[in-house]
């Protein structure tokens, strides 16, 4: 169903989805290592440094430990929900992340294989291109609230249940501000499609309002210069969406033992962890995409790069692969920076109290997001007069 | 039509996750049954509360308020995406003013909600 016109295209598209998912899973141990080393650096400690160079083999040691833990299900648990929750925790992150465009498409010309001619193909460097990309990503990633409730209810432990309720109430409360902060961005770009948004952020800064034009050749045409408030609100709410400090009330150790995953250990716990990092990755990807030019390279437009690549490589396939590679690198730099900010904030800010958290979401972020929407609408309307 | 890709990856991840759980249950140590060990976690004390602990009704209230406000926000999406089209065809003032009326009702609802102490946690 819509995965390609022949067997080769369907296979490549399927493999691409699997590779994106495995990339996400593989990034988690590296991020955990980075988080432990980073927290040690911030708190003036050493962190893991015994196993292998720089403690990098710690990742393997952790994996072995996860695998050798005995399989434990409490007597009060509902086994179906208890086992299904960690599996489903992997799904929203990977499905939403596959919709984020990471580079320009790779064009493959006609070639011969198995005594047959295979037509020209265009492969996107993303799982699937969805016309209403933003709505899809917001919708799918908010399904994670069900995972939390399944884990909390299925464990049959009051700490799990309380943690799950807290986490889901927090997730849905911050989703309002998250959804509303995007409205200004959508209004500015006039599209739901994420690739189109990236292409609109090419070139130097150019802003016209009521006959005046502000342009600077030294700044890229990024969304952050048009929507600074939306960027701040969006990034703040994504911390709450992914249950990270300073909003990790779901697992406040001093009150709830470990929150919704109190009864989970070994690999099942690890899968919740992958889910949480998956949300961080979606947030970082969207942050780069909406406000920092996506896969675009500042000051170099896609067309210029394509012309340059056509001179360097012999074939059209090679040129498109080179362009895609460079854009992918640019996306990864921005993406990694925001992932690092997630870790940085976690080890810098203390945790909120629950009523403060709810007040902050409903009474501070939501009104500011509304104000941003009204202001953006007013400016776009006034600029057209 | 990317639906095929979405269905494929959901099924793949579900099978992959189930396979991981199965492998982890085989490689882990053999569990030895013990009534006390298999109680739900309670810091070493006997469990006093049962699993269906009573929880604050505020969570339910928050969920209802979320549905109301989320639907109102969803209505802003089609407006936001067609705003520039309306401006270019001359309907800008109409669309702008009608949405401001809608947002005024939204703000009234938010004020009423705060005023009625629906968001106060004790």
Image: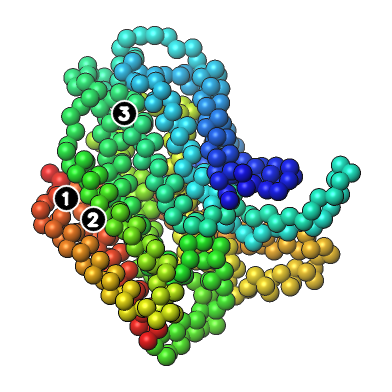
Say which mark, if any, is on residue B119. Answer: 1
Q: Which circle marks residue A328 in the picture?
A: none
Q: Dot 1 surroundings within 10 Å: few (below 14), some, or many (20 or more)?
A: some
Q: Residue A248 appears in which quarter of the rendering? A: top left
Secondary structure at badge 1 equals loop
Residue at screen point 27% across, 60% down: A366
Q: Badge 3: few (under 14), some or many (20 or more) residues near its Cα, within 10 Å?
A: many
Identify the disc placed on residue A153.
3
Give the Cα separation between the discs numbered 1 and 3: 24 Å
Toward the left, the furthest residue is B116
When the figure is inspected, residue A214 is found, relative to residue A167, above or below; the finding is below
Q: How far apart are marks 2 and 3 (CA)?
A: 26 Å
State the residue position of label 2: A362
Chain label for disc 2 = A
Work out whether A385 lies above or below A372. below
Residue B33 image point, x, y percent: 39, 9
Q: Which x, y percent locates residue A164?
A: 30, 36
């Amino acid at each position: 169903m819509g995965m390609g016109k022949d067997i080769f295209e369907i296979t490549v598209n399927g493999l691409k989805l699997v590779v994106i998912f495995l990339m996400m899973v593989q990034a988690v141990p590296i991020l955990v290592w980075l988080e432990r080393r980073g927290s040690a650096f911030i708190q003036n400690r050493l962190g893991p440094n015994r196993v292998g160079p720089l403690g990098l083999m710690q990742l393997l040691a952790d994996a072995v430990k996860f695998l050798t833990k005995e399989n434990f299900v409490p007597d009060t648990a509902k086994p179906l929900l208890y086992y299904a929750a960690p599996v489903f925790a992997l799904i929203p992150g990977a499905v939403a992340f596959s919709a984020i465009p990471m580079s320009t498409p790779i064009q493959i010309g006609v070639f011969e294989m198995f005594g047959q001619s295979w037509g020209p193909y265009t492969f996107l460097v993303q799982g699937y291109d969805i016309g209403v990309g933003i709505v899809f990503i917001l919708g799918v990633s908010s399904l994670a609230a069900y995972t939390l409730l399944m884990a909390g209810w299925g464990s049959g432990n009051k700490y799990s249940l309380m943690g799950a309720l807290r986490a889901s109430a927090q997730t849905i409360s911050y989703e309002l501000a998250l959804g509303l902060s995007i409205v200004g961005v959508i209004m500015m770009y006039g599209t739901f499609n994420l690739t189109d948004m990236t292409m609109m952020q090419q070139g130097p800064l150019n802003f016209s309002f009521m006959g005046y034009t502000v342009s600077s050749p030294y700044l890229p045409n990024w969304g952050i210069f048009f929507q600074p408030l939306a960027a701040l609100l969006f990034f703040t709410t994504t911390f709450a969406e992914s249950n990270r400090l300073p909003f990790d009330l779901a697992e406040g150790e001093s009150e709830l033992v470990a929150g919704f995953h109190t009864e989970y250990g070994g690999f099942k716990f690890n899968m919740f962890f992958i889910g949480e990092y998956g949300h961080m990755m979606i947030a970082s990807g969207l942050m780069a995409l909406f406000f920092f030019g996506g896969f675009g390279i500042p000051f170099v437009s896609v067309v210029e790069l394509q012309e340059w690549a056509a001179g360097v490589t012999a074939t059209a396939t090679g040129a498109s692969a080179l362009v895609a590679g460079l854009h992918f690198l640019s996306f990864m730099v921005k993406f990694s920076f925001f992932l690092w900010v997630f870790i940085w904030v976690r080890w810098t800010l203390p945790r909120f109290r629950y009523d403060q958290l709810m007040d902050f979401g409903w009474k501070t972020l939501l009104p500011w997001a509304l104000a941003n929407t009204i202001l953006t609408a007013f400016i776009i309307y006034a600029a057209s007069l | 039509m990317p639906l095929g890709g979405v269905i494929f990856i959901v099924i793949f991840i579900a099978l992959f996750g189930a396979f991981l759980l199965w492998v982890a249950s085989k490689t882990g140590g053999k569990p030895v049954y013990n009534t006390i060990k298999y109680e739900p976690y309670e810091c070493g004390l006997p469990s006093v509360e049962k699993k269906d602990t009573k929880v604050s009704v505020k969570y339910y209230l928050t969920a209802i308020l979320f549905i109301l406000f989320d639907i109102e926000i969803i209505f802003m999406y089609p407006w936001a995406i067609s705003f520039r089209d309306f401006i270019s065809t001359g309907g800008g003032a109409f669309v702008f003013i009608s949405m401001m009326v809608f947002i005024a009702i939204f703000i009234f609802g938010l004020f009423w909600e705060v005023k009625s102490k629906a968001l106060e946690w004790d």
